[in-house]
Image (cartoon, rainbow, N blue to C red):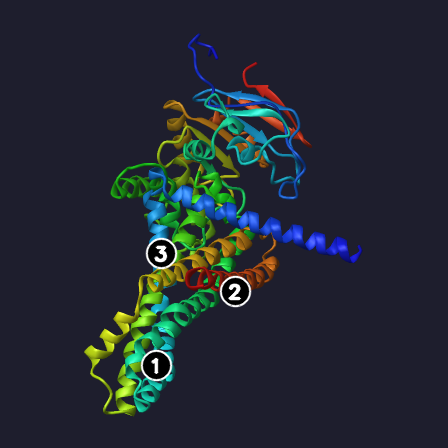
Amino acid sequence: MRTASGEMKEPVLSFAGVTTEPDAAYDVPIWEVDFTLLPGELLLVRLERGHFRIPLADAAVGLLEPIRGEVRFRGEDWRAMSPDRAASQRGKCGRVFIGHGWLGDMTVNDNITLTQRHHTGRLEADIEAEAANLARFFGLPGLPLRAPGQTRRDDLGRAALARVFLGRPDLIILEEPTRHIFPDIMPPLLNAIRAARDRGAAVAWITGESRIWNEKALHAEWKGTMFGSRMQLSREGD
Amino acid sequence: MNAVARIGDYTLGKWGELRTLGAVLWAVSVTATRPGFWKRTVRAEIARQIYSAGVEASRFVAYVAFALGVSVVAQALAWMHKFGQTRSLGPVLVAVLVRQAVPVLTNLLAIARNGTALTTELGTMKASGEVRVLDAQGLDPFVYLVVPRVLGLTTAVFCLNVIFLVVAFASGYVFSTLLSPDIEDAAAFVHSVLVSVGPLDLVNFLTISLVPALLTGAICCIEGLAVGSSVTEVPAAARRALARSVRALFLTTALISFLTYV
């Protein structure tokens, strides 16, 4: 796909007519959703009042198979990937989960570094050093060493952001990333997002908060408003 | 629904369970032989399973083995000595303990101690969304949760079998020397046991140690991951896993013994 500057870029994530089945795990399914995120682009999605869980993030990482349409990550349809390939590609996606996104039987520290330890051959010391830097960047004194159940929820919110940016992911999905930590988290979060976009990552930020929706410093290329299952997409600046 | 339909329904249900079990075991063996499977996170998970199912259970198993050794081996030794049949002591002990009692008992202990815990752990993870969190991060739940648990439990059960045998024989011998001071010396006892173990006994011991443990691991993982979104389903899943594992244990033990010795 050609960008505004005329440069050819492969989309990081594209939804083409994606429709999902109603599922009790989500407040609404999605219907005929279309968008393409190029490297460095940000899509801000505003949820309808009273809706918290939509299948957009699960569909984006190939966890949820659409009944119509296709979701492509780095040009590949999730459905066409082998389980190993899909798992490896998901390792390139960072995500803040809307619910409790932690494994209870390991420490927050291990939770943060798990994906990198699994998908890469990096030295554990390197991974831990990068994770500790990110944790400090997001306002933690260091890596939280307790289990998620014994960690304060605002610390968990900051740790979730450290996990997302660890390992320089290609796609960053943020589901209500500022919950419990707004507004203190905004400056480091915006800086981290800017740096990630500069190196070519695409970002999808899903929120129900007007203050995030109206945040000018986000510089979102795309804004999508959910009306029930449909998403009305607009390009900023158009 | 009439009786014939019920029987048909039951049979198809059981056939479906069996096929799933077979498919999981096949997938475990195929996955475990792929070089890409042995990532450090998976290796750590296997080690954690071996520690939890094996090392942590070893004291408990040793305690049961000690008690069994005292009650069974000591009695057999003392009575056979009394009747002057100490030469047939080895074959008798091998027949009773090595061929059947120890593998079955160890597997039963593993089912009760680890199988139920495994189902509960996976069921709770599934209900609380942790399995989905793993999947979303590219950690295939089958590779990261199922395969390490099946392999870890099997390895642990085999090691526990060996510990059980050694402790049972040792405690039995020590206790029998207290009961009957003119009992043969330790070297002769060990020799009589070792010469009684034939190749078929070794094959039988290995298979009865490994196959039911593999089945237990797979059954408990299947039942745990079959839990839906509610934690109230976990106790029922644990009960089903327990019942199916015990049934599988006795069925496979009987089948293996029949195939080995008849």
**Mark 2 — on which chain does it sit?**
B
| Disc ID at residue A45 | none
Q: Earlier in the sequence, mark 3 or mark 2?
A: 3
**Callouts 1 and 3 in the same chain:** yes
Residue drawn at 43 percent across, 21 percent down: A39
- Front residue (pair A145, A30): A30
Q: Secondary structure at mark 3?
A: helix
Subunit bearing disc 3:
B
Q: Amino acid at mark 2?
A: Val
Residue placed furthest toward the right: B2
**Label at residue B73:** 1
Considering only order in the chain, which callout, 2 or 1, is on the residue closer to the N terminus?
1
Q: Position of residue A214 (x, y in %)?
A: 55, 29
Between marks 1 and 3, how big is the CA–CA gap?
34 Å
Tell me the residue that label 2 is attached to: B246
Local SS, label 2: helix
Q: How far is the residue under mark 3 from the one under mark 2?
A: 24 Å
- Label 1 or label 3, whichever lies nearer to me, is 1
Residue type pointed to by label 1: Val
Q: Quadrant of the C terminus of chain B?
A: bottom left
The answer to which quarter of the image holds residue B179 is bottom left
Element on which disc 1 rests: helix
Of the numbered discs 1 and 3, the one sitting upstream in the chain is 3
User: Pointer 3: what residue?
Assistant: B48
Assess disc 3: are there few (<14), some (14-19) or many (≥20) residues with their C-alpha within 10 Å of its C-alpha: some
Local crowd size for mark 2, using a 10 Å CA cut-off: few (<14), some (14–19), many (≥20): some
Q: Which image quadrant for residue A24?
A: top right
Percent across and percent down for residue A65 are: 58, 32
Query: Is the residue B109 above or below the residue A140 in the image?
Result: below
Distance of label 1 from label 2 (alpha carbons) = 26 Å
